[in-house]
Amino acid sequence: MRIVMGAQNCGFGPVSELVAVSRPLHEHERVFVGDGVAAVFARRNPDAFDTLYDTSGLSESARSAVIDDLLRGSDHVISVMDAELVFRSVVARRPVTMVDSLFSFWQLTQPPARIRDLCATMPRSCFAAADQHLSGLSPHDRVVAAHLLATHSVVQNFPGVTERAAGLAALGEGPEIHLTGSIVDVEGLRNVTRTAEPEHDLLINIGGFKNFLLDFDVHDDYVRLLHRWIPDLLRDWPRFRRVLVCGGPFGEGRERTVRAAGGRADCRLLPQRELLQVVASTADYLLAPGLTALHESIALGRLPLAIHEQHYAHVFTLRALDGTLFGRGAGRFTDVVPSHPLPEDDFAGTAALVELAGRVREDGELYATYRRTFNERIEQYLSLTPPQRRIGVEELGKLLDGDPVQSVMTGILGGPHAA
């Protein structure tokens, strides 16, 4: 079976989940298509795909032609939160599975029944007509529309997911929603060497970073704040002599090394399975609170410390997990500026976080507060005993549990809609 695959071009979360879904499907022909940070991650993990089409830099017409040609030659399509790929698949009359780790996150501007009606009447003549028909939907509405239009819907467990699934099921339209546990690279996690001598005293994972607003050179105040803080981390914590800072902003020739107070921080982007090895062998782990990286950490038995939010989805995640040890210990920008307004909106909330990171970086007093409160969070984290960390991992595991995504996908691809 020839399977065309793509992921939402928003950080490394969606594409890392695509890699996790793709790797066990090696008996099929796996074709990746995408651009931007998703393509960067796919190129760093080439073993997950048989063929890779990077559409970065193509004109919109050329990009559309590549995708549509691939869809015409496919037997099945897998989309991780990429609504457009689902719509194109429906127009191409190809069975498509929509995979989603943020199912309860999407903020709807239209009633679900209205979205259902638009899906039911969406023209299938060409993608341009379908896209125009759905043009009144917000980006979040479109993700939910993609679920309703997909042949199969696969969603990762999280607070609020079962309630949203029940609401969509009550509409009487759309596919069965399959609830899964962690959408992670099970084989890669299973094969890490847990007895390996640690190369680093501390791992800091900031994820892909790049999304609809954030970029490596645009709206990058968070990364610039990180650059200011890393030398102070080395000064404030002599126990961290060897630090690895991993993430999208340090790939594609952007690697750097920072030295201060006898310590060293290497900033670079690792292939996914190499990063999993570092997570498994490094005792202390600071993590931008993305769900995929958190699930990987849980699977490896590591309780990370959440660092300050990059975008609004991180705010949503920390709020949903506030009752857990992980959530209570998280670093937040509200520790620094409690009165800073944060709109309850994906784009506006993310823009507010960018502004806040810039204020903290540029204002000496705010930066001193950031440094002090972050050090307090780190101190609390380091004071946790191994049994306390184990309890923190176990409570997250129970909260986020579900059927293995690999077994769900095997059932789908072996079912009546597989071809």
Image (cartoon, grey):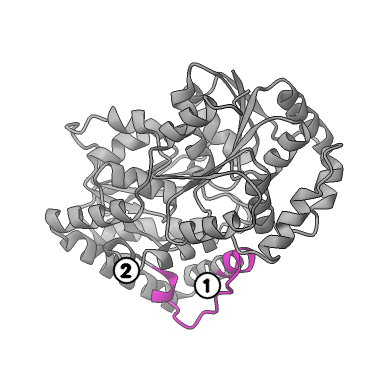
Image height check: is 109 above or below 338? above
**Tag 2 secondary structure:** loop
- The image's mark for residue 323 is 2
Q: Amino acid at mark 2?
A: Gly
**Tag 1 secondary structure:** helix
Q: Which residue is mark 1?
A: 359
Find residue 377 and report its horizontal and vertical position in percent. 28, 67
Nearest to N terminus: mark 2 or mark 1: 2
Q: Quadrant of the N terminus?
A: top right
- Label 1 Cα crowd, 10 Å radius (few <14 / some 14-19 / many 20+): some
Q: Quadrant of the C terminus?
A: top right
Taking depth in this image into account, of 380 and 19 the one nearest to the observer is 19
Q: Residue furthest bottom?
A: 339
Q: Amino acid at mark 1?
A: Arg
Query: Do the CB atoms of the residues marked 2 and 1 lie less than 8 Å apart?
Result: no
Taking depth in this image into account, of 163 and 256 the one nearest to the observer is 163
- Label 2 Cα crowd, 10 Å radius (few <14 / some 14-19 / many 20+): few
Residue 335 among those drawn in magenta: yes
Find residue 103 and report its horizontal and vertical position in percent. 53, 54
Q: Which residues are magenta?
A: 332-352
Find residue 223 and report its horizontal and vertical position in percent. 50, 55
Label 2 – label 1 distance at C-alpha: 29 Å
Does residue 32 show up? Answer: no
Say which quarter of the image contains residue 31: top right
